[in-house]
């Protein structure tokens, strides 16, 4: 059986799947990634940790699959998008740590851009807004030292998002590319021309010599060195994690939408060849069409979702494992009045407030860890509902069904709560790692494993969660969340 190795480099770990030609997952691997927080609001990774994590996960997945060496025909890569790495082209040594998408160090620079009236100008060109989330101000910050800038301008250095770095390392530096989906998240990519835009490079003073070549998401870009996975393998699929999940969910027709519950929560609705413009703080981004070519989508971003559970585990120590959360949520009738807004890295869509920080309201002496855990789970559903409501208005019609994936989507209690809060059915696929599945599909289409996106999707089965609440109950829950968001924004803006 022909099979594809999918490498998914997320924010907290590297996952690998070996996906067979019948769409089944033959083997899995996983490695957690160390997080670095050198200053408040700063988030970093060691680039070599990222590479070694996916190599180790890939080898584990191949061993678990128990397939013949010749059955593995190629690699698909998906990644955490806006995270940026700078490295030496010849030695492949990183110039400092990766700056992670959650990092807030360039908040002041983004505020100046907004104060200068640049927001509409940037949005019209990129579909994005001035926010530290995106890559451009991170790259600008990396080049602040004159010696680094000189090396960048002379062509000694290369920059890229995570899939670009992984491809360079896997190929021994022979290939420096990115795909359209990742490029569209840098704030240096023009949506209309579908390429790097000179005016944006000038605004952020980024030398064009530093940037990767932009390629399609489905297509062979190079060959990995034999040392990593036993023999050379063509790298034939590249996509940002959320666009990869959108493709993996089969959302390649206008109006189809999915929500991924990972470190953050990310809602995308496919709009096809039409570049939709949001009136509710959503972003226009590049997606992948059924043929692997660039298309458009609307996106809403919640910066902290599953990461709130990680904080409850690692920061507070009130749970030992994230999968305890479902039983704890079921153990209490409600949150006992507690609402948790886990904005540790600012508020994303639709508010775009980088100064927002985590807020917990409604605490009493009767509050228990079960109430706090349940409130953290509820926050994922409420923040996602904020995005879906705006997206429905932008689209001019309500969402018929929401497809879901990511680690937290395995939580039945959370998925039922999401359906109840939305008043919309929620569908979860039999394999929730659709980010990696999408990368496998893109690579497999390029290599002839699947003839079309439809053929790739044939193996998927879904569990459906149907809403149970009436309108009054839904409104009561949403009102409490809206009040808590208001308190968070009031604090972030100094009472303004």
Image: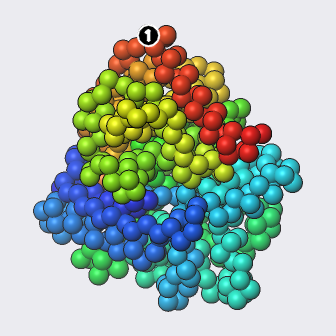
Locate residue 349, reporting x and y percent. 61, 40
Horizontal side of residue 131 vs 202, given as left or right = left
The quarter of the rendered structure image containing the C terminus is: top right
Question: Can residue 87 be seen in this snapshot?
Answer: no
Residue picked out by circle 1: 470
Residue farthest right in this picture:
116
What residue is rendered at 71% in x and 49% in y? 129
Question: Residue 87 is drawn in which quadrant?
Answer: bottom right
Locate residue 457, reporting x and y percent. 33, 39
The quarter of the rendered structure image containing the N terminus is: bottom left
Residue farthest front in this picture:
365
Horizontal side of residue 342 vs 186, given as left or right = left
Front residue of this view, candidates 315 and 156: 315
Front residue of this view, candidates 426 and 36: 36
186 w.r.t. 298: above or below: below
Question: Can residue 111 be seen in this snapshot?
Answer: yes
Locate residue 233, reporting x and y percent. 32, 71
Locate residue 89, reporting x and y percent. 55, 84
């Amino acid at each position: 059986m022909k099979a594809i190795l999918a490498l998914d480099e997320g924010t907290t770990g590297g996952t690998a799947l070996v996906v067979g030609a019948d769409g089944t997952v033959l083997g899995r691997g996983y490695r957690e990634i160390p997080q670095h927080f050198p200053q408040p609001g700063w988030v970093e990774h060691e680039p070599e940790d990222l590479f070694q994590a996916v190599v180790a996960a890939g080898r584990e997945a191949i061993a678990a699959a128990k397939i013949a060496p010749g059955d593995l025909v190629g690699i698909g890569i998906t990644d955490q998008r806006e995270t940026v790495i700078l490295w030496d082209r010849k030695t492949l040594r990183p110039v400092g740590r990766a700056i992670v998408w959650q990092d807030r160090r360039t908040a002041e620079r983004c505020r100046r851009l907004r104060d200068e009236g640049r927001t509409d100008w940037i949005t019209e060109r990129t579909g994005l807004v001035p926010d530290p989330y995106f890559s451009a101000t991170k790259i600008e910050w990396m080049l602040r030292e004159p010696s680094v800038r000189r090396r960048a301008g002379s062509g000694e250095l290369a920059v890229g998002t995570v899939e670009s770095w992984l491809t360079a390392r896997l190929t021994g530096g022979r290939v420096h590319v990115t795909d359209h989906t990742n490029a569209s998240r840098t704030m240096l990519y023009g949506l209309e021309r579908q390429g790097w835009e000179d005016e944006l490079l000038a605004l952020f003073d980024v030398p064009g010599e530093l940037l990767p070549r932009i390629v399609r998401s489905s297509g062979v870009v190079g060959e990995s060195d034999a040392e990593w996975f036993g023999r050379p393998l063509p790298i034939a699929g590249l996509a940002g994690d959320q666009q990869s999940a959108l493709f993996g969910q089969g959302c390649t027709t206008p109006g189809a939408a999915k929500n991924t519950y990972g470190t953050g929560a990310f809602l995308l609705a496919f709009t096809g060849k039409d570049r939709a413009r949001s009136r509710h703080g959503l972003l226009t981004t590049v997606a992948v069409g059924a043929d692997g070519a660039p298309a458009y989508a609307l996106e809403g971003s919640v910066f902290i979702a599953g990461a709130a559970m990680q904080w409850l585990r690692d920061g507070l120590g009130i749970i030992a494992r994230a999968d305890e959360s479902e039983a704890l949520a079921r153990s209490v009738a409600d949150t006992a009045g507690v609402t948790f807004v886990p904005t540790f890295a600012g508020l994303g869509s639709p508010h775009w407030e980088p100064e927002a920080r985590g807020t917990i309201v409604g605490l009493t002496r009767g509050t228990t860890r079960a109430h706090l855990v349940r409130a953290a789970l509820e926050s994922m559903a409420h923040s996602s509902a904020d995005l879906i409501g705006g997206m429905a208005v932008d689209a001019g019609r309500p969402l018929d069904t929401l497809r879901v994936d990511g680690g937290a989507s395995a939580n039945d209690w959370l998925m039922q709560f999401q359906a109840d809060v939305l008043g919309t059915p929620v569908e979860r696929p039999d394999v929730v790692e659709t980010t990696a599945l999408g990368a496998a599909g893109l690579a497999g289409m390029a290599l002839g494993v699947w003839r079309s996106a439809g053929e790739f999707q044939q193996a998927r089965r879904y569990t459906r969660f149907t809403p149970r609440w009436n309108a009054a109950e839904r409104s009561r829950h949403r009102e409490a969340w809206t009040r808590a968001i208001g308190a968070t924004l009031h604090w972030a803006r100094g009472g303004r």
